[in-house]
Amino acid sequence: AQSVSQHNHHVILSEAASLELGCNYSYGGTVNLFWYVQYPGQHLQLLLKYFSGDPLVKGIKGFEAEFIKSKFSFNLRKPSVQWSDTAEYFCVGGTASKLTFGTGTRLQVTL
Amino acid sequence: DTGVSQDPRHKITKRGQNVTFRCDPISEHNRLYWYRQTLGQGPEFLTYFQNEAQLEKSRLLSDRFSAERPKGSFSTLEIQRTEQGDSAMYLCASSPSGGGGYEQYFGPGTRLTVT
């Protein structure tokens, strides 16, 4: 069965701190992994995606994620967070027919 | 840049009533998806269309739920005899066919409250 699990439900960081959000997946076959973000009052937006090639993928707003096949992980990172990064972050696995979301991590960045 | 649009954005209804939501995908996207999101959870897949064909349905989609995409463009999701447990955000997404990645573009959602 396809599943995605996120380790952190709520993370609070000060501005300029480094961020790493954990994600593990369980998938058979071809892996398509994503991180989506939902800013307060806005709809879900794609941060970055991985489906083949370089396991280190870069997304918008300085985010990156590394696909580590041996660990079944796809952690999201950002070296220095900003207050505007306050949002809910979802790790997602996908096929052509559907996406499977993790439960989400609520990130709160304080000034 | 016209993204995915959904109508209405909010719907309050009484238990037992029927409701219908509409989704307009990005115009060149032939794949369309419905998801449901409850508080504190990630979105859960409901159903998937490729053009007008409904190719996959989740077990979450009980017989009170029906979705259509008659001309392969907009889609409707109807819930009959609503129950309080149907209260949730209903999200629509679309994606183009072909290529890799299967990324989906989401609309703003319709928030349903059943009283």
Image (spheres, rainbow, N blue to C red):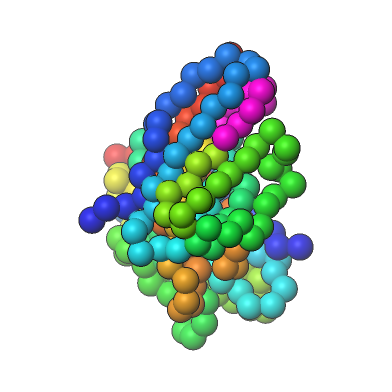
Segment colored magenta: B78-89
Task: Report the side of A39 relative to A71 (left or right).
Answer: left
Q: Magenta includes B86? A: yes
Outermost left residue: B1
- Residue A110 image offset from top left, x and y in percent: 35, 39
Task: Report the side of B70 relative to A83 (left or right).
Answer: right
- Residue B102 image offset from top left, x and y in percent: 50, 68
Residue A107 visible somewhere in the drawing? no
Which residue shows up at 48% across the image and 47% down it?
B75
**Residue B88 vertical position relative to residue B70 in the rendered view, above or below:** above
Given residues B4 and A74, the one toward you in this image is B4
Task: Report the side of A97 relative to B28 (left or right).
Answer: right
Outermost front residue: B71
Tally of numbered tags: 0
In which quadrant of the rendered view does residue B40 lie?
Answer: top right
Q: Magenta includes B22? A: no
Which residue shows up at 30% across the image and 60% down it?
A61
Which image quadrant: the N terminus of chain B? Answer: bottom left
Which image quadrant: the C terminus of chain B? Answer: top right
**Residue B106 vertical position relative to residue B28 in the rendered view, above or below:** above
Given residues A56 and B106, the one toward you in this image is B106
Which residue shows up at 60% across the image and 67% down it?
A95
Given residues A28 and B16, the one toward you in this image is B16
- Residue A84 image offset from top left, x and y in percent: 29, 46
Outermost bottom residue: A53
Residue B56 visible somewhere in the drawing? yes
- Residue A3 image offset from top left, x and y in percent: 69, 59
Which residue shows up at 43% across the image and 49% down it?
B74
**Residue B83 vertical position relative to residue B79 in the rendered view, above or below:** above
